[in-house]
Amino acid sequence: MTSDPQTIAVMVLERIRTVIGPFSRKAVVALHEPDFSDTRAAELVQDCINTGWVSTAGRWVEVFERELSAATGASHVVAVANGTVALRLALNLVGVGPGDEVLMPPISFVATANAAAHLGAIPHFVDIEPESLGLSPQALRIRLEELAERRGSTVINCQSGRRIAAILPVHVFGMPAEIEPILAIARAWELPVIEDAAEALGSWRGGTHCGLFGSVGTLSFNGNKLITTGGGGALLTHDEALAQRARHLSTTAKLPHPWEFQHDAVGWNDRLPNLNAALGVAQLEVLASRLERKRLLQERYREAFRGLEGVELLEAPAGCRVNHWLATLRFTAEDVALASRQRLALLERAHAEGLLLRPVWQPLSTLPMYREAPAGPLDRALEAAERLINLPSSPQLLISHG
Ligand SMILES: *Cc1c(COP(=O)(O)O)cnc(C)c1O
């Protein structure tokens, strides 16, 4: 079996073609594209235009929240402008503020760290667990034991002198993080857990939807996510008081009154416009069929890559139902540098041929604005960042080519 990067690249592309059909520079295939073809999107958006209810109030916002509750089992859903503000609001709700540290994994979209930074807080990176790609409970426990100390009701990072205010696990590519041991550690230290479930609509660990293990979870409905509202996000919680506070702060902290403009806090204008919610309602109507198509797509990839040495398809962690948001391939060569060269060869060839494959994100701890941020050993994260590549995962690929 060859380990030559060019040969492997050719073989991987060949197998991707057997799943999604032809692609070329004239018919480019992106990683994940929005699809409204089998939905009532036009009708519901037209309703907003006809009625004039286009902005941050309107019946589609309420319907969208209700339908999201039904889809996830969340007692309360608050729809907001995007996944980043959902995270920022969630962190604020559990008391994260300027100068606080938030424990999080470095393998995530940049918004996870930005949301903390927007509040003046500081990301503190802790390594991942290589199977689920989520925050490692072990690394988290060790990191806290090594440098944290309880003082009264607060947890202090003895190295930086700053307060550690929250734990922020991420459910990467829709694969649930190992959340139960993380919750146990959080309970022991009395730290709140906010889950970044931006990529995990339709993903469950046991009988619980991602985002509903901790205090608050957040979703994103950006154009590349499983379903989209154009731009949008949501908070999921079982905590009624938190949900009420989220609604209040996201609507400029305005006190209810027929005409007075009374505000009792520095709030945000974070709510999801009705226009976007209308798109979301239309998308949620086809959520089940999208999830089913993505499950089939993953099955086809599994077949296609079976027996191909040097790569493996990531699979759902045990006991989880996952949404397969982005199918992910790992280069398994023992030598990380070789795996990385193989991946680069695949990226170059794929892009030259019109297939927009993407490596996993650059670890957040290596970005210029977070390079100085506190961090434990990140060996697993740095290695994952060399080995992983996302495959085209739009549910409509199965219909158009399959
Ligand atoms: C998409 C995403 C976000 C941010 O969502 P936006 O709606 O783009 O602001 C946050 N975290 C993760 C892991 C994401 O994938």
Image (cartoon, rainbow, N blue to C red):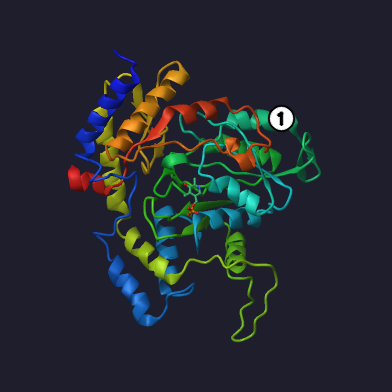
- Looking at the image, is 60 positioned above or below residue 3? below
**Label 1: element kind:** helix
Identify the image quadrant of the C terminus: top left
> Which quadrant of the view contains residue 58?
bottom left
> Which quadrant of the view contains residue 15?
top left
Along the line of sight, the residue nearer the viewer: 210 or 374: 374
Confirm whether residue 134 shows in the render. Answer: yes
> Which quadrant of the view contains residue 17?
top left
| Residue appearing at x 31%, y 18% in the figure | 309
- Disc 1 target residue: 145
| Residue appearing at x 54%, y 35% in the figure | 363
Answer with left or right where residue 98 lies relative to residue 390: right
Identify the image quadrant of the N terminus: top left
Answer with left or right where residue 249 lies relative to residue 20: right
Percent across and percent down for residue 338 are: 42, 19
| Residue appearing at x 76%, y 45% in the figure | 154
Percent across and percent down for residue 268 are: 61, 66
Q: Could you tell me how many numbered marks the image carries?
A: 1
> Around disc 1, counting alpha carbons within 10 Å, would you say few (fewer than 14), some (14 to 19), or many (20 or more)?
few
Percent across and percent down for residue 76 are: 51, 60
Answer with left or right where residue 63 lies relative to residue 294: right
Confirm whether residue 303 shows in the render. Answer: no
